Amino acid sequence: MRKYYCLCALFICLLLCACSNTGDTTGKTRMELQNPAEPTEREPLSEEKQDDLITVTQTGKLREDMPEFLFRLTAYYDLQMEGYALQTVDVYQGDTRLQTISIPELTMGGQTCIDASSQDTLGFELEDVNFDGYQDIRLFDTLNGNYRTEWIYLVWNAEEQRFENDPRLNQISLAVFDQEEQLIYGMERSGAACHYYSAYQYIDGEIVRIHYYEEEGLAISDEQIVQYYDAASIKTDGTAFDAWYQHVMERNAATGELETVSEEYVFNPYDSEGNAIENEEEQLRVDVSSGLGEKISADLSR
């Protein structure tokens, strides 16, 4: 379980870095203005340029034994939204256009809002999001509030030879795809000290949550926490503490339901200089259902 928490933290950090710099994942990019009279170099966007359509071309293989695909993305810069509004994605195999995908109706708010820093890619990525061995299209949609980023997922249907929108993946906040473990990690938060981590797995074609971990910071005075230490007969050199509610759930394979593995109040000690005391014996963990846990719950409800 500790490995799961570490993976969650690692993947979310990687994702936040990726969201701040949506680079070219295919390795080949070409940008053109449909109006050839306009320069192709970056320059400040003026009101006159708001209606210009730009085309970004990327290439990549869906699988190593397949020929290279070409993806032509068409967008314009919306001055009010201060971002690029992606209109279409044309998919080519050689000289054959396999598909034209209209984007606005797949977005959260009617159009994408892609930052100017991603002008070279228009938020386009190739990644195997369903672990079937084929690269799929992941398109940046927009930022959406507190630790939330919206994407458009276009999954390759090998039988139909076309990409299909999979809105189920949009429900996973900050989704990160672990190709080795074939798991999807997600994270949400409701405040600075309230975080919720999940891990999902494809089971019979469905996206199923198999792990859940939540942590919420608690406002409890140091004096009160010392009383809890005394009640639990735990010795500590800590002079200050932080307090957390932690809840861990795992999917029961037999019932298909998430079941509680642990539900605890956790207190971490710090020395007089504010340094964490690493001795695990000085960490106080209290089962919520225990007598002391019920007292803590009652104190918190006052």
Image (cartoon, rainbow, N blue to C red):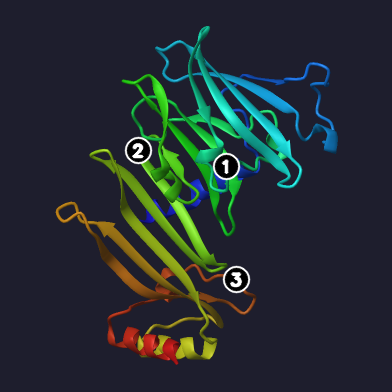
Disc 1 marks which amino acid? Asp
Measured from the top left, where is residue 95 in percent x and y? 53, 7
Q: Residues within 10 Å of mark 3 (few under 14, many from 20)?
A: few
List the residue tagged with mark 3.
275
| Residue 182 marker | 2
Q: Amino acid at mark 2?
A: Gln
Q: Which residue is mark 1?
A: 141
225 displayed left or right of 34: left
Q: Nearer the viewer, mark 1 or mark 3?
A: 1
Which residue is rendered at x = 57% and y = 28% of the image? 88
User: Label 2: how many residues lie within 10 Å, few (<14), some (14-19) or many (20+)?
Assistant: some
Foreground residue among 105 and 158: 105
Residue occupying the point 60% across, 71% down: 275
Residue farthest top in this picture = 95
Image spot of residue 11 (x, y percent): 49, 46
| Quadrant position of residue 147 | bottom right
The reply, left or right, for residue 196 in relation to residue 122 is left
**Res. 35 visible in picture:** yes
Helix, strand or loop under label 3: loop
Instruction: Indicate whether 97 appears above or below 257.
Output: above
Q: Nearer the viewer, residue 42 or 160?
A: 160
Answer with mark 2 or mark 1, whichever residue precedes in sequence. 1
Residues at discs 2 and 1 in contact (Cβ within 8 Å):
no
Foreground: disc 3 or disc 2: 2
Disc 1 element: strand
Q: Nearer the viewer, residue 221 or 208?
A: 208
Mark earlier in primary sequence (3, 2): 2
Q: Nearer the viewer, mark 2 or mark 1?
A: 1
Q: Position of residue 276 (x, y in %)?
A: 55, 70
